[in-house]
Image (cartoon, rainbow, N blue to C red):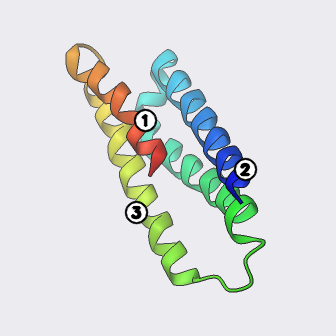
Amino acid sequence: MISFKIVYFALKFGFFLALVRSFVTYEALHKHFLALSVLYTVVVAGLSYAFLLSWQPVVDWAAWGKWLGLTLLISSVYFWLLARYEDGVIFWILLLAGVGVCLF
C-alpha cells in the first residue's frame, strides 16, 4: 500500500510539474487556465482511482467526488494566480506553493 501511494504522488507531482512548465513556457496557455485545471483534475482522478481506490472493497464515492471538486477549485485558483502574476516575487512564491497544491 505504501508503494502505491509513493508511485501515485510521484506521477501526480511529475504531471503537475509538466503542466506548470508548459504553462510558464507558452504564453497562449495563460488564457486557458481553466482547461489546464480540468485536465489536471481528470488526470488526478484517474491516478487516484487506479492507485488508491480500485483495490479497496468499499469506496466512499461521495467523499471522493468532493475531494475532486476541491482539487478542481484549488488548481483553478492556482493557475489563475500564475496567469495573473507572471513576473516578480509573487510568481516565484506561487511556484513554490505549487508543491502544496500537488500534495493535496
Task: Give the distance between the C-alpha atoms of the residues marked 2 and 1, in whole angstroms.
Answer: 20 Å
Task: Give the distance between the C-alpha atoms of the residues marked 3 and 2, in whole angstroms.
Answer: 25 Å
Give the residue type at disc 1: Val
Q: Quadrant of residue 70?
A: bottom left
Q: Which numbered disc flags the more N-terminal residue, 3 or 2?
A: 2
Label number found at residue 3: 2
Above or below, 13 against 2 in this view is above
Give the residue at mark 3: 70
Give the residue at mark 1: 99
| Residue 61 rendering spot, x and y as whole percentages | 58, 81
Residue 41 visible in image: yes
Q: Residue at x 29, y 35 (%)?
A: 81
Q: Dot 2, crowdedness within 10 Å: few (<14), some or many (≥20)?
A: few
Give the residue type at disc 3: Leu
Q: Residue furthest left?
A: 89
Q: Quadrant of residue 93?
A: top left
Q: Residue at x 62, y 33 (%)?
A: 14
Q: Is residue 28 left or right of residue 42?
A: left
| Residue 23 rendering spot, x and y as whole percentages | 49, 26
Residue 83 visible in image: no
Q: Is residue 16 left or right of residue 104?
A: right
Give the residue type at disc 2: Ser
Q: Quadrant of residue 99?
A: top left
Q: Which numbered disc flags the more N-terminal residue, 2 or 1?
A: 2
